[in-house]
Amino acid sequence: MSMNFKELADKYGTPLYVYDFNHLSDRYNSLKKAFEGQKSIISYAVKSNSNLSVINHLASLGAGADCVSIGEVRRALKSGVDKYKIIFSGVGKRDDEIREALELGILFINLESEAEMKRVELIAMELDIMARISVRVNPNIDAKTHPYISTGLHESKFGVEIDMAKRMYIYAKNSKNLNPIGIHFHIGSQLTKLEPIREACDIVASLVKSLSAIKIDIKFFDIGGGIGVRYDDEITITPQEYADTIIESTKKLDVTLMCEPGRFITANSGYFVTKVLYEKQNPTTRFVIVDGAMNDLIRPSLYSAYHKIEAYDKEGETSKANIVGPVCESGDFFGKAVELPKLDHNDLLIIHSTGAYGFTMASNYNTRNRSAEVAIIDGKDRLIRERESFETQIALEEKYLI
């Protein structure tokens, strides 16, 4: 590891999130290059890491934003993302969120149900504007990924079936306040196989052709995100293979291709730095107790997700240990049976690949302050979110104390 995590821990405290911004640039540019020669928009999935500086850095490279709340739309605009590169997705948009998105004039709202389409139409009618929309189609493809992050099957809450999508497009075409300009699908996250992507693209491209035959002109073909990354020893898809598959499936369509990478860009840019408090040995298990916890990084507890964990600047004979935090839950762990040398108070552990769905899913459970976040740009460190304090945590409650 080339970063001096000891210096960073001394300067900013622990637990701490550290992001390599040069890595963000490399990942974004690798996708942009893969789609070279095509009309394309790469809309960064803000939910994966919503720090303003991360979004701003990607916006400076030309990225759009895929947002799933009006808060994320506001973050994207505040971070300099072009409003015509912002889309607003998600199954449960409130009326006030729909209204604000329409007034802001973003590229389009992505519809997840017929009922939602009717709400968008009604609000657009009240505002006397034409709402640009796309429909999220569920192609019923098994993404071969973790069930919690698989989104393209019938039992998923996301999207609508092909027949319902057709009916929605015909309804929108005949509406005075809806302009159906896009089509969208997303079959799941952490995809490591091309075949499900190819199958889904072919199904949705076929739908676009049939819509074209009835004079519904789709301009944006949004294939969602989900391109997988390496946490352990996964064999992943290259950006060029990914782009080539999509380009091949859509070659007979005159569309702008859109994709929504999140994890692909941010995951391996991030490191979570946590300090060893104690070691504890019970009759069967060695525990390493650290100052970070599931409230800081919930992926291992939530998904049994694997993250590589290393002792920083510490060598010696290793043995298996469970790395656990201070939160009062049995599920509060970062790794189990991890080979580590003997560790002392204040030694550091580095948890890899934590740039996506790390800080963004953090909470204040057990009244714990959320970590600071630091960017490394061309080898220089810069604070991009200060550590919370007890005072900032209780500020919204204190004035109402009974």
Image (cartoon, rainbow, N blue to C red):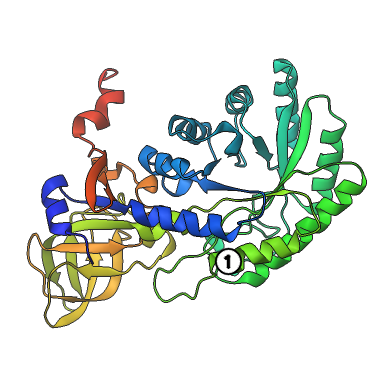
Residue 233 found in image quarter: bottom left
Closer to the camera in the image, 199 or 212: 212
Q: Position of residue 48 (x, y in %)?
A: 45, 49
Amino acid type shown at disc 1: Gln
- Quadrant into which the N terminus falls: bottom left
Closer to the camera in the image, 364 or 174: 174
- Quadrant into which the C terminus falls: top left
Q: Residue at x 37, y 57 (%)?
A: 23
Indicate left or right for 353 with 170 as reference. left
Any part of residue 354 in sight? no
Q: Which residue is mark 1?
A: 240
Q: Position of residue 62 (x, y in %)?
A: 51, 43
Residue extending farthest to the bottom is 317
| Dot 1: element | helix
Closer to the camera in the image, 106 or 233: 106
349 is higher (above) or lower (below) than 365 = below
Q: Residue at x 16, y 59 (%)?
A: 4
Indicate left or right for 383 with 28 as reference. left
Q: Residue at x 67, y 52 (%)?
A: 185
Any part of residue 350 in sight? yes
322 is higher (above) or lower (below) than 101 = below
- Crowdedness of circle 1 by 10 Å Cα count: few (<14), some, many (20+)? some
Residue 99 found in image quarter: top right
Residue extending farthest to the front is 37
Labels in figure, total: 1
Q: Position of residue 35 (x, y in %)?
A: 61, 57
Q: Position of residue 144 (x, y in %)?
A: 60, 70
Residue extending farthest to the left is 345
Indicate left or right for 88 with 293 as reference. right
